[in-house]
Image (cartoon, rainbow, N blue to C red):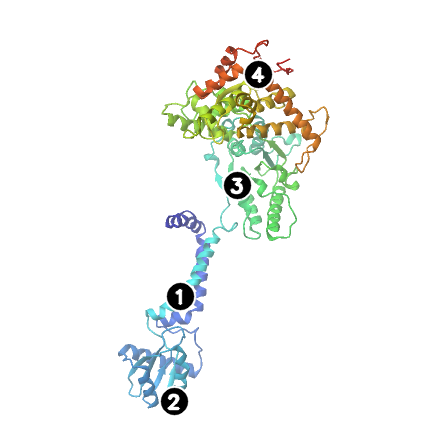
């Protein structure tokens, strides 16, 4: 607890005070001045001086009171004051021995009465209760005793205690306001991270896997260097460029590379930097950002996650909606406001372009929309090689195979694989990162860590081996299936085993034959369980396979028009409901896949058993070992061996029984 408070003060409070020391000094002085003015009488009394602000001047009575106060102060400091009991004090008043008395000034302070006897000596007494002050005052008046109240006192703890207690809330509120001042947008400096041109070493060569996006941004660099480069043709430099793509594809790195290539200052911001609790200050922060960028031209302003700032205006009546709309309006004005030749370029990134306001993404503000997609096979190979330069990568490490085995991975995920591979090599005790470490890292990223200490029963292990053998066998037999990379029964994450298939190339469209092959591979595990243990011994291990097969069949029938009965129509309901004709066609597709797989497994029963036994023995089999087991296993009598020969052409699939 105390460590957190200390870190908060060191990292947040002190830097905020350092950035705004002038504002803090002025505010602190004003707070102290106000507190001093409010408590001027107490301060004057505590230090033994007169306060002209606390008492009236110019009258005979006030002059007489001040004179008596000075006389009383000198007398009190000149001789000690004996203390009488309250009863003795009352008796002296009634007998006329008291000539003057000083009553307490505050009901919450010390209830002490100082009085002067007729012989000139001074003494004190204490009131038993503050409620008796009025009774004593009436008694003094009745006996014609002079009453004095406005008496300055020497510096003592009894008087300073109430003073500091009254100042403490004011000081606390002042400290809180000073801290919040450091967080108010527009009061402090420009938000975000400034990177000077001399400190930005990022170039386009450091960005891999997004060649098309880099090509579109090269012109933006030229416009920053020379805004009149295309002026002869009448072209105007772009005001803003919107980078659209999934997370982790390198949008921030691209923006930094644009600034580095142009030798411009780079200001990195987030859309949330403009969303604040202070009304109207989000718009003020936008104006400060653009003003600072113009002073540092050439400059690149990069706004990450702009969807949190530029979301479509809802027209709501709440204060948050109005503040969000005002901030967005300020951004729209600034994008229109600066001239085309001021050498300021605005780059923004989002993965939710559909949520942005139409006025923000129109030409004239964000003139270009650059798609930064997931890298293809060549891009993944370049990204892996780029990140491999910073680690000790073995020369024999197969980055090509790793690139083929990571379709759909972003640049950030590929960098994570290289990093995890370095940890895997360290756990293994290796000096360099080899292909084994890369495989381990990819499986770890995709499926989770190995569950080496899983206490599972022998029959569960046998059933898992047959289940994965079924997937592997069908993947080997189907010509249009992706090649099998490996099969394993090593538990990872929630999976007890898996069969990894790696595509030979990136695929942007899938044929019906490819989808039927994937459907057959999905049902292969359950069919293998039925064939070995019987229908009454099947397990819940096929849950993920059932979900994948159902989803694939639904898309084939309802979205892609691959049902002869339903025709070339989309049956994908917006509410997620599946109509009865669609259900019937989905069941027909899955039943056909089950029929095909049962036929193939009856023919290749020996190969299925050989793969299952090999998995129980070795736990992991690679592609070569699987193909060797399939080729060496005999087939059922009266049939020919069926080993898939893959090509890029669409091959019609006939049932092996036929």
Residue 567: give x, y in percent of width and height: 73, 26
2 and 4 marks in contact (CB < 8 Å): no
Residue 323 in sight? yes
Q: Residues within 10 Å of mark 1 (few under 14, many from 20)?
A: few
The secondary structure type at the circle numbered 2 is loop
Instruction: Name the residue carrying label 4.
Output: 602
Distance, label 2 to label 3, CA atoms, is 79 Å
The secondary structure type at the circle numbered 3 is strand
Above or below, comparing residue 19 to residue 304 in the picture: below
Q: Earlier in the sequence, mark 2 or mark 1?
A: 2
Q: Quadrant of residue 145?
A: bottom left
Residue 155: give x, y in percent of width and height: 33, 70
Q: Which mark is residue 165?
A: 1
The secondary structure type at the circle numbered 4 is helix
Mark toward the viewer: 2 or 4: 4
Q: Earlier in the sequence, mark 2 or mark 4?
A: 2
């Amino acid at each position: 607890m105390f460590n957190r408070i200390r870190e908060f003060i060191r990292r947040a409070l002190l830097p905020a005070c350092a950035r705004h020391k002038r504002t803090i000094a002025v505010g602190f002085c004003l707070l102290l001045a106000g507190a001093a003015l409010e408590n001027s009488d107490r301060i004057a009394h505590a230090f033994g001086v007169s306060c002209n602000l606390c008492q009236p001047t110019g009258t005979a009575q006030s002059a007489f009171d001040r004179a008596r106060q000075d006389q009383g102060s000198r007398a009190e400091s000149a001789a000690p004051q004996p203390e009488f009991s309250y009863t003795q004090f009352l008796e002296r008043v009634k007998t006329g021995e008291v000539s003057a008395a000083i009553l307490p000034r505050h009901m919450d302070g010390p209830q002490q009465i100082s009085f002067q006897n007729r012989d000139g000596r001074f003494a004190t007494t204490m009131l038993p209760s503050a409620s008796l002050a009025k009774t004593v005052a009436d008694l003094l008046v009745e006996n014609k005793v002079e009453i004095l109240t406005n008496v300055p006192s020497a510096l003592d703890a009894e008087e300073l205690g109430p003073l500091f207690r009254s100042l403490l809330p004011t000081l606390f509120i002042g400290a809180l306001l000073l801290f919040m001042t450091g967080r108010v947008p527009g009061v402090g400096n420009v938000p975000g991270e400034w990177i000077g041109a001399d400190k930005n070493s990022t170039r386009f060569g450091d960005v891999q896997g997004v060649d098309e996006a880099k090509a579109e941004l090269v012109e933006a660099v030229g416009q920053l260097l020379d805004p009149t480069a295309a002026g002869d043709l009448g072209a105007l430099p772009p005001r803003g460029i919107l980078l659209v793509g999934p997370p982790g594809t390198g949008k921030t790195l691209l923006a930094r590379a644009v600034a580095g290539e142009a030798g411009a200052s780079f200001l990195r911001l987030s859309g949330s930097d403009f969303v604040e609790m202070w009304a109207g200050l989000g718009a003020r922060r936008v104006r400060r950002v653009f003003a600072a960028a113009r002073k540092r031209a050439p400059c690149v302003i990069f706004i990450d996650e702009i969807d949190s700032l530029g979301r479509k205006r809802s027209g709501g009546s709440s204060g948050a909606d109005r503040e969000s709309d005002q901030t967005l309006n300020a951004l729209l004005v600034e994008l229109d406001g600066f001239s085309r030749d001021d050498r300021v370029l605005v780059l923004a990134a989002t993965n939710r372009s559909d949520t942005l306001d139409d006025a923000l993404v129109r030409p004239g503000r964000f003139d270009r929309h650059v798609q930064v997609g997931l890298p293809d096979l060549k891009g993944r190979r370049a990204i892996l090689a780029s990140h491999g330069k910073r680690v000790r990568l073995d020369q024999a490490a197969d980055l090509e195979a790793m690139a083929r085995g990571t379709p759909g991975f972003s640049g950030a995920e590929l960098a994570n694989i290289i990093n995890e591979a370095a940890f895997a090599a360290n756990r293994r005790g290796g000096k360099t990162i080899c292909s084994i470490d890369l495989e381990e890292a990819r499986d770890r990223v995709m499926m989770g860590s190995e569950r080496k200490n899983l206490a599972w029963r022998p029959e569960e292990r046998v059933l898992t081996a047959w289940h994965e053998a079924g997937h592997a066998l069908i993947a080997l037999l189907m010509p249009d299936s992706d090649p099998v990379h490996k099969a394993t029964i090593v538990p990872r994450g929630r999976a007890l085993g898996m069969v990894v298939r790696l595509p030979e190339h990136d695929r942007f469209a899938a044929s019906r034959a490819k989808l039927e092959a994937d459907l057959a591979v999905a049902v292969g595990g359950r069919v293998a369980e039925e064939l070995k243990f019987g229908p009454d011994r099947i397990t819940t291990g096929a849950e993920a396979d059932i979900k994948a097969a159902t989803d694939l069949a639904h898309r084939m029938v309802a979205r892609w028009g691959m049902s002869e009965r339903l025709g070339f129509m989309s049956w994908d309901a917006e509410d997620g409901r599946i109509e009865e004709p669609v259900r019937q066609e989905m069941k027909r597709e899955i039943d056909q896949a089950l029929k095909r797989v049962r036929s193939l497994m009856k023919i290749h029963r020996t190969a299925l058993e050989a793969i299952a036994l090999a998995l129980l023995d070795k736990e992991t089999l690679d592609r070569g070992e699987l193909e060797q087991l399939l080729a060496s296993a005999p087939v059922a009598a009266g049939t020919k061996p069926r080993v898939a020969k893959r090509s890029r052409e669409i091959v019609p699939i006939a049932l092996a029984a036929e």
